[in-house]
Image: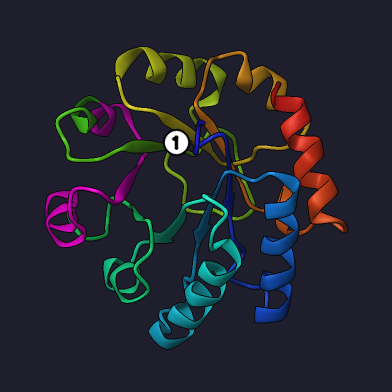
Amino acid sequence: MNDYRLYLVTDDQQDLATLKHVVNEALQGGVTMVQVREKHGDVRAFIERAQMVKEILKGSGVPLIINDRVDVALAVDADGVHLGQDDMPVEIARQLIGANKILGLSIENEAQLAQADNLPIDYIGLSAIFATPTKTNTKKHWGIEGLQKALSTTSLPIVAIGGIHEGNIPELMATGVHGLALVSAICHAKDPKSATEYLLGLMD
């Protein structure tokens, strides 16, 4: 099974009850990986959110990934952590989480991509593919051509992130990308379960 296929990234603006609803529904809809994101710097709240999501995913085989914070990933014994370029160096993160946890890294330009295969990571989050309202400080938009180039450059699985919606999914899947990371298409859907099923259908 390809865990990266439909990769849900939670919306840190949503309250606990909404988060619980979204993750529950997305899980029933067939989401294959869940990353909990919390950008407000409140570690206690982050741990609470992560523990709740872990409880929902328990026994499902769907990995729980923590965004940015290795300490939170360790605190809740998550399945892995996803780091940005300004977070803890991946070499140190790998030492802390051990060999069996999943470690992802956001790659934002060609220079970073060229280094990726030498790093102790399991997958790349290629960011951002298209312009997106959830990430305003993006340095680069890879586009379809950039994604194709990245896929031919690295041997690591690539999860495409940024500006992904139903209109561009078939085109993205045609590149052979390993997974798509989505926030609003699932988190802001009226019916997250149906939205997840629909998105997976577009990926076939």
Q: Work out whether residue 134 or residue 10 is closer to the camera in this orientation and state it.
A: 10
Q: Is residue 108 magenta?
A: yes
For the point 51% across and 15% down, the residue is 145
Q: Residue furthest right?
A: 190
Q: Work out whether residue 157 or residue 79 is closer to the camera in this orientation and state it.
A: 79
- Give left or right: position of 167 versus 79: right
Where, quadrant-wise, is the C terminus in this rendering? Answer: top right
For the point 49% across and 82% down, the residue is 48
Residue 49 image position (x, y, % from top left): 53, 77
- Give left or right: position of 156 versus 117: right
Provide the secondary structure element on which disc 1 rests.
loop
| Res 44 visible | yes
Reply above or below: 82 against 197.
below
Reply above or below: 184 against 71.
above
Residue 200 image position (x, y, % from top left): 72, 33
For the point 71% across and 79% down, the residue is 17
Q: Work out whether residue 63 or residue 172 is closer to the camera in this orientation and state it.
A: 63
Q: Which residue is mark 1?
A: 140
| Res 168 visible | no
Q: Mark 1: few, some, or many residues within 10 Å (few <14, many ≥20)? A: some
In the rendered structure, which amino acid carries the disc numbered 1?
Lys
Give the magenta part as a residue range. Answer: 90-113
For the point 49% across and 26% down, the residue is 178
Residue 66 image position (x, y, % from top left): 41, 62
